[in-house]
């Protein structure tokens, strides 16, 4: 079995893909499902998210479909018209039972769309569900597991590489893999940059979130394997504009 | 002063840029200049390289401009019509006095073109000229040094990240820098993946070159700071199709 780690999304994934954007999209995704959301819809743009929830008639009146709640951010801050930011701490304080959460974020949702272009199985992974996500990937994969780091604004981000290293460690403990350069880099970062909170809070994105008053999200995202929920792409539903993930 | 390390070319460089593609373009570039080449012309395509050297008249006869020699590769192998591959060992056995070498390679020349779009000073760095390149960058930079890893086929390559770590170590010894996520990753790789030859020969690209019978090039590229030649973009000459580097 091959283990491939892309430090930025690249494409061309043929088998099982773990999408990683731990600050914060894939961490928040786990929290939404933990708190009862029946599905997550990852849209390709904020507009696509709004148009799922809102119908505008000829007189300009907006009708809201109560089935959907919108969560997302740009540059760490909530998007206009959205119901929630992209905060796992905020999500953990809500009850989403019976609702679908429509997500659009700067990096993670884009990475998921790249993964879904060719991947047979697409899972959202973070530190909080790392062991469950690795185990699920190992069970699904036939020839390759690709861990795809979302990065921040098309540059490699330390926290995603660290999380990829944690996932890679779990996978290597589960069986034989040939590893690529990306996997070796991720494993080296995981083993040498201290505990998860040290790594995340010292990353460029971690520092930015702390400055925005979102440090609690960083601490939340640094907990390892506390959830067994693995957001899993439901290939049979959704659309190219909105990928549908359910709890797996 | 800021130290930025991009594990893949990104763009938007405002000051001094060190372009790294140690297997093999930036290592070979140093060898060409060491062996007397008066300039390197890095073209944006193999065709642009051929058209610099060859003039075709109306009857289809080719006239060769003897001032130019062509060096380049695709997938590690020499390009059709070129005079040389992209091999530092091959270059070291030649005398290029009075000639200009026109280079086109898979990754390194593309990275140099991205760097040249906005960079004020663009230098080619490898392990073999690492200390000289770092010192030169430190002398030129006003606010930021960016180390740009070329990668391999748009994926991060271990050997370039390792070399970026070597350059970053030299720079940090020369003065105060604020470092980004990429620099921390490169420094961690440099400090934990053994000596240069271990790192290079175990990288994906190193293994490929060994298979192609080019293992001597890998060993050549693993020598640290044996040359003081730093290929330096001559901003006043060249063209968008062919960046002109001279020994600095």
Image: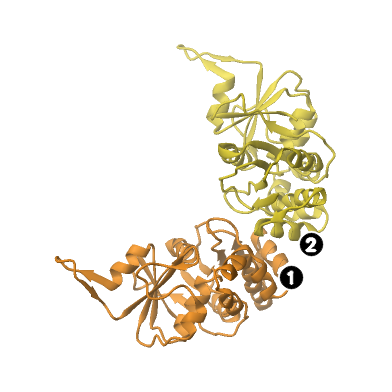
Chain colours: A orange, B yellow
Decide if residue B20 is in sight here: no
Q: CB of mark 1 within 8 Å of CB of mark 2?
A: yes
Horizontal relation, residue A82 to residue B22: left or right: left
Query: Is the same chain shared between marks 1 and 2?
Result: no
Horizontal relation, residue A42 to residue A51: left or right: right
Give the camera-side residue of A18 and A40.
A40
Identify residue for label 2.
B192
Q: Residue at x 68, y 77 (%)?
A: A173
Identify residue for label 1.
A191
- Whether A27 is drawn above or below B88: the answer is below
Q: In the structure shown, which secondary structural element does the residue marked by tag 1 occupy?
A: helix
Residue A57, position as x, y percentages in the image: 17, 68
Decide if residue A204 is in sight here: yes
Residue A210, position as x, y percentages in the image: 59, 70
Q: Residue at x 30, y 81 (%)?
A: A67
Q: Chain of mark 1?
A: A
- Whether B63 is drawn above or below B14: the answer is above
Q: Chain of mark 2?
A: B
- Whether A66 is drawn above or below B217: the answer is below
| Residue ranking furthest to the left | A58
In terms of image quadrants, where is residue A180? bottom right
In terms of image quadrants, where is residue B101? top right
Give the camera-side residue of B182 and B43.
B182
Q: In the structure shown, which secondary structural element does the residue marked by tag 2 occupy?
A: helix
């Amino acid at each position: 079995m091959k283990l491939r780690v892309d430090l930025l999304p690249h494409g061309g994934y043929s088998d099982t893909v773990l999408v990683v954007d731990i600050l914060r999209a894939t961490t928040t995704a786990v929290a939404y499902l933990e708190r009862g959301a029946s599905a997550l819809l990852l849209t390709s743009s904020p507009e696509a998210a709004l148009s799922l929830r809102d119908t505008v008639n000829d007189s300009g009146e907006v009708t809201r479909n109560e089935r959907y709640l919108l969560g997302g951010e740009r540059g760490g801050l909530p998007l206009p018209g959205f119901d929630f930011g992209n905060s796992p701490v905020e999500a953990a304080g809500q009850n989403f039972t019976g609702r679908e959460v429509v997500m659009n974020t700067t990096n993670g949702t884009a990475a998921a769309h790249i993964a879904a272009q060719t991947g047979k199985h697409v899972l959202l992974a973070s530190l909080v569900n790392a062991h469950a996500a690795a185990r699920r990937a190992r069970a699904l994969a036939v020839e390759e597991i690709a861990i795809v780091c979302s990065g921040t604004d098309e540059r490699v981000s330390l926290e995603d590489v660290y999380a990829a290293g944690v996932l890679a460690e779990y996978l290597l403990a589960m069986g034989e893999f040939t590893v690529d350069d990306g996997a070796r880099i991720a494993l080296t970062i995981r083993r040498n940059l201290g505990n998860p909170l040290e790594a995340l809070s010292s990353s460029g994105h971690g520092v930015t979130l702390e400055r925005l008053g979102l440090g609690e999200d960083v601490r939340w995202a640094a907990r390892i394997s506390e959830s067994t929920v693995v957001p899993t792409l439901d290939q049979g539903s959704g659309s190219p504009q909105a990928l549908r993930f359910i709890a797996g």
